[in-house]
Amino acid sequence: MKSRNRPAKGLVNTEELGRAIKRRREERGLSLRDVASETSVSASTLSRIENGTGKPDADNIARLTTWLDVPMERILSGRDSKAEESKAVIYYPEEPTPEIVEAHLRADKNLTPDTAAALSELFRVAYTQFSKSEGSKKRR
């Protein structure tokens, strides 16, 4: 019997997916329509996913994880972060470094979700800045 006070947790981590889509879209300076064109997922569906109100189907999950270059397992975790505090973070070698660091920060039971998000964003900005700077210096 489901509790009326708490909605059932689905297998798709739509919050994670929405956050990843919005971040990648903003990093690339794309509109929802641009992403819709690249992924074959409608702009309205993308908007709902970004806002946390959409429930993408399996085809859209596959399209979006491919566009994000994120393993589908990351989105299909269906995990409750409070219930799984002690579980190890799983990462995939093909994932970009900022995504791996973000996963570790979110899993750190010593950090609040807001602190983990802030640290993740700081790392992402620094990584982007320094990884481009280091590449430019090597080419000279």
Image (cartoon, grey):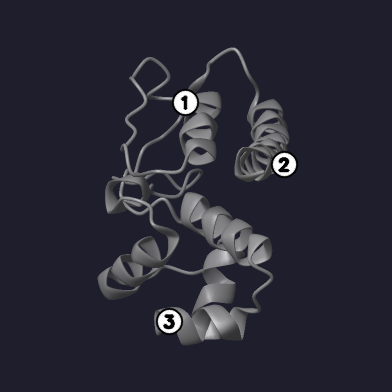
In the drawing, does residue 60 fall left or right of residue 127?
Answer: left
Q: What amino acid type should be assigned to the residue bearing mark 2?
A: Gln
| Amino acid residing under circle 3 | Val
Element at badge 3? loop
Label 2: state its secondary structure: helix
- Quadrant in which residue 21 is drawn: bottom right
Between discs 1 and 2, the one toward the N terminus: 1
Query: How busy is the neighbourhood of tag 3: few (under 14 within 10 Å), some, or many (20 plus)?
Result: some
Cα separation between marks 3 and 2: 31 Å
Q: Which residue is drawn at 63% across and 18% down?
A: 111
Q: Name the residue under label 2.
A: 129
Q: Residue 41 carries which label?
A: 3
Q: Nearer the viewer, residue 56 or 41?
A: 41
In the picture, measured across the screen, residue 62 lies left or right of residue 119, that is left
Cα–Cα gap, marks 3 and 1: 31 Å
Task: Kindly identify the residue that appears in the image at 70 percent across and 40 percent down.
Answer: 133
Percent across and percent down for residue 106 are 53, 29
Q: Name the residue under label 1.
A: 82
* Callout in the foreground (3, 1): 3
Mark number for residue 138? none
| Relative to 33, 66 lies left or right | left
Q: In the rendered view, does 137 fall on the left or right side of 52?
A: right
Question: Image quadrant for the C terminus?
Answer: top right
Q: Nearer the viewer, mark 3 or mark 2?
A: 2
Q: Earlier in the sequence, mark 3 or mark 1?
A: 3
Q: Which residue is drawn at 52% across and 67% down?
A: 49
